[in-house]
Image (cartoon, helix red, strand yellow):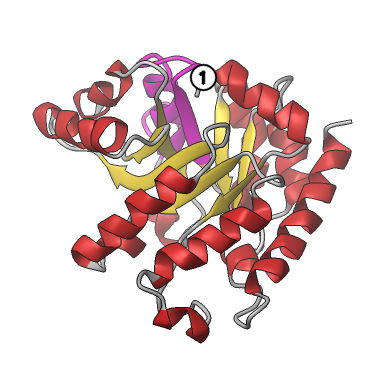
Amino acid sequence: MNKKDLVNQIRHKRTFLCIGLDTDINKIPKHLLVCDDPVFEFNKQIIDSTQDLCVAYKLNTAFYESNGIKGWESLIKTLNYIPENIFSIADAKRGDIGNTSQMYAETFFKTIPFDSVTVNPYMGSDSVKPFLNFDGKWVVLLALTSNHGSKDFQNILDNESLPLYKKVIQTSKNWGNEDNMMFVVGATKAGALAEIRKIIPNHFLLVPGVGAQGGSLKDVVEYGMNHDCGLLINSSRSIIYSSNDLKFATSARESALKIKKEMEAFLD
């Protein structure tokens, strides 16, 4: 999916919600455990109940890899079930020396054809550029994250008093462009978005942390939205685990609809 298509979906659906399918078999409703593939059945029902309320689904691969071959099968079936007009993100956080990154890119863009994959920039340009050689595919580069340990490295200042996360954005924005690169900025770091927008005014940002992690949608929009919207707000646990009974999919829809209605006001 290219940038124009993504922006059109946001405008058409009046939402910029990304739903994280970080599906833990230990947290899904017990009645699904009798299914041949409980994880896929859970994901399928979530997708059926929310696909008109979101423009993207993000699958954290760790929740699937941990289940071995069966987990990979669940992931592939889930990806194939996502409608073509919805942006798909492999939250895999890959990145290695060039030839290894090339294999990772082929994994998530050819073998398991996601629209995008999250990439860790720590090893530099040659670990990221192989992912940028695929037409219509996106790199979602880690920049400023919401986790507690993010302060260990991401805010370290260089000789010019520039935090590392800004250095990452300034340098990497030239590896690709606004049509094939997004950046991850945590919702709990919303105050930094204004400065980030000075560096990358037109790129999309994937923003996790609204919902269970306590990030503010209003603050993210105030500091991070651009003329194309430029935001994908990810919410996972607060939607998919809003209930664990027989009506879990209905409950997930209600939670997603609440966020979607809040987003509509910012798209007027």
Residue assigned mark 1? 2
**Where residue 102 sits: x, y (%)?**
17, 28
Q: Is residue 83 above or below residue 252?
A: above
Say if residue 228 shows up in the picture. Answer: yes
8 is higher (above) or lower (below) than 244 = above
Q: Nearer the viewer, residue 144 or 211?
A: 211
x then y, percent, for residue 138? 41, 27
Against 88, is 230 above or below?
above
* Quadrant location of the C terminus in the rendered image: top right
Q: Is residue 209 at all visible to an observer of this figure?
A: no
Q: Is residue 181 magenta?
A: yes
- 214 horizontally vs 218: left or right: left
On screen, residue 204 above or below 65? above
Locate residue 229 relative to residue 165 in the image: left or right: right
For numbered disc 1, what is the local secondary structure? loop
In the picture, measured across the screen, residue 77 lies left or right of residue 196, that is: left
Q: 178 and 112: which one is in front?
A: 112
Q: Judge the density around disc 1: few (<14), some (14-19), many (≥20) Cα neighbours within 10 Å.
A: some
Dot 1 amino acid type? Asn
Residue at 74% across / 39% down in the picture?
Answer: 15
How far across and down, in percent of the image, does residue 11 sit? 76, 27
Which residues, given as a range, are shown in magenta?
A: 157-184
